[in-house]
Amino acid sequence: MARILVIEDEQDLADLLEYNLKGDGHAPEVARTGAAGVSRVKAMLQEGKLNEAKRPELVLLDLMLPDISGSEVCRMIRELPDGKRLPIIMVTARGEETDRVRGLELGADDYVVKPFSVKELLLRVKAVLRRGTEADDAKPAEGVRTAGDIRLDPVRHEVTVKGTTVALTALEFRLLKTFLERPGRVQTRETLLSDVWGIEADITTRTVDTHVKRLREKLGPAGDVIETIRGVGYKLGD
């Protein structure tokens, strides 16, 4: 069971999400405005410090809210001390790729476009929660992985370049970890969508390209170790 906060102003949709999440074994709460959502996230994170069972595990965030845009809410959550690793799935009527990419660039872990099937949404929720569990369950035996000046510690969930910490979203961390685990092996966009996103999601290949581009930018010159294989995908170079 996961504790999930739904930030959604449409009553019918909020009720639908709450009902189906409960039916899937989760414990959802609903906030009807962006401000209320940010306030509730802060409170839930604080509660989680005192009682692990009350720690929030996922946020379902509408992009079009009556007071604060979902993009701004996402940014505000990511700026919270304990909000950087809180998974966020954006739920919105905006289906243009630019909107999808914008949401993912802000730190969202996935993006679902209205109208959507409840089954698909629940699958995406399960996939995002599974990624978080795998990160939390990382064992010291997995070991630190390096490539050039890049150092990734799966246990501490930390990435550094020449000793300087690089702030990555949970998805960017998983993407980099996938490359480091498969040095020299070409990863197609389809493989990355399956292994990094966790399901066969309806996300365009340009989104993969955007994520790789942003990952390289965050890594600086060290990011050049991720090579583009034109027409195929990417690989971690020698």
Image: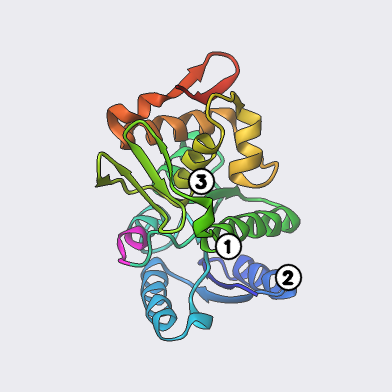
Instruction: Please state the horizontal and vertical placement of residue 23, each as a whole percent of the image.
Output: 74, 74
Residue 133's tag is: 1
Instruction: Please state the horizontal and vertical placement of residue 105, each as a whole percent of the image.
Output: 41, 42
**Vertical placement of residue 59 versus 19, above or below:** above
Instruction: Look at label 2 and name its amino acid.
Output: Asp
Q: Is residue 43 magenta?
A: no
Q: Residue at horizontal 51%, vertical 34%?
A: 179
Quarter placement of the C terminus: top left
Q: In terms of secondary structure, where does tag 2 sit? A: loop
**Circle nearer the viewer, 2 or 1:** 1
Instruction: Look at label 1 and name its amino acid.
Output: Thr
Distance in Å between CA atoms under marks 2 and 1: 17 Å
Residue 27's tag is: none
Q: Residue at horizontal 37%, vertical 80%?
A: 46
Crowding at dot 1, Cα within 10 Å, few <14 / some 14-19 / many 20+, comes out as few
Image position of 109 (left or right of 119): left
Instruction: Look at label 3 and name its amino acid.
Output: Arg
Which residues, given as a range, are shown in magenta?
76-81
Secondary structure of the magenta portion, mostly?
A: helix
Distance in Å between CA atoms under marks 2 and 3: 26 Å
**Circle nearer the viewer, 2 or 3:** 3
Crowding at dot 2, Cα within 10 Å, few <14 / some 14-19 / many 20+, comes out as few
Q: Is mark 2 in CB contact (under 8 Å) with mark 1?
A: no
Q: In terms of secondary structure, where does tag 1 sit? A: helix
Circle 2 residue: 24
Quarter placement of the N terminus: bottom right
Circle 3 residue: 174
Instruction: Please state the horizontal and vertical placement of residue 191, each as a whole percent of the image.
Output: 65, 33
